[in-house]
Amino acid sequence: MSEPISDTRVPRLAVGCRVRTLSPDEAMLLVPEGALRLKGAASEIIGLIDGQRSIAAITIELQQKHAATDPSQIAAEVKQFLEKLHARSVLLYNE
């Protein structure tokens, strides 16, 4: 099992991957093997990945936007989503 991802890491999309916004709540993640349609939280998270924001900054921004939602739930969802993208080699981390 892999180590937990540090909140200070800065995610970025891998070469050849890009995001196309379809609507405020939906995006398409274009990857070399095809495309992934993202809705809801996944669309929001991917929209905040810019190679500048840390995982902590992304999480805080979503927690502020969704103040009625449990902050620990948002943090867990962000990390889980990023881990899935990283496992598929769609997401890398700036060191």
Image (cartoon, grey):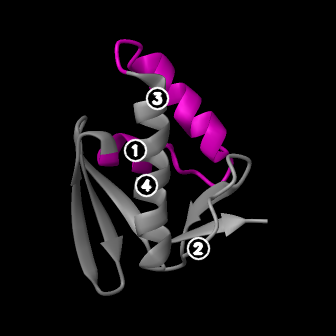
Q: Secondary structure at mark 2?
A: loop
Residue 38, given in percent of the width and then of the height, sits at 24, 54
The residue identified by callout 1 is: 77
Q: Alpha-carbon distance for marks 3 and 4?
A: 14 Å
Q: In the displayed image of the protein, which residue is found farthest to the bottom?
A: 33
Looking at the image, tell me whether mark 4 or mark 2 is earlier in sequence order. 2
Q: Alpha-carbon distance for marks 1 and 2?
A: 17 Å
Q: Could you tell me which quadrant the C terminus lies in? A: bottom right
Q: Alpha-carbon distance for marks 1 and 4?
A: 5 Å
Say if the magenta span includes residue 58.
Answer: yes
The residue identified by callout 2 is: 2
State yes or no: discs 2 and 3 in contact (Cβ < 8 Å): no
State yes or no: discs 3 and 4 in contact (Cβ < 8 Å): no
Looking at the image, tell me whether mark 1 or mark 2 is earlier in sequence order. 2
Looking at the image, tell me whether mark 1 or mark 3 is earlier in sequence order. 3
- Give the number of the mark in front: 1 or 3: 1
Looking at the image, tell me whether mark 3 or mark 4 is earlier in sequence order. 3
Q: Secondary structure at mark 4?
A: helix
Magenta range is 42-69
Mark 4 crowd level (few <14, some 14–19, many ≥20, 10 Å Cα): few
The residue identified by callout 4 is: 80
The residue identified by callout 3 is: 62
Mark 2: amino acid: Ser
State yes or no: discs 1 and 4 in contact (Cβ < 8 Å): yes
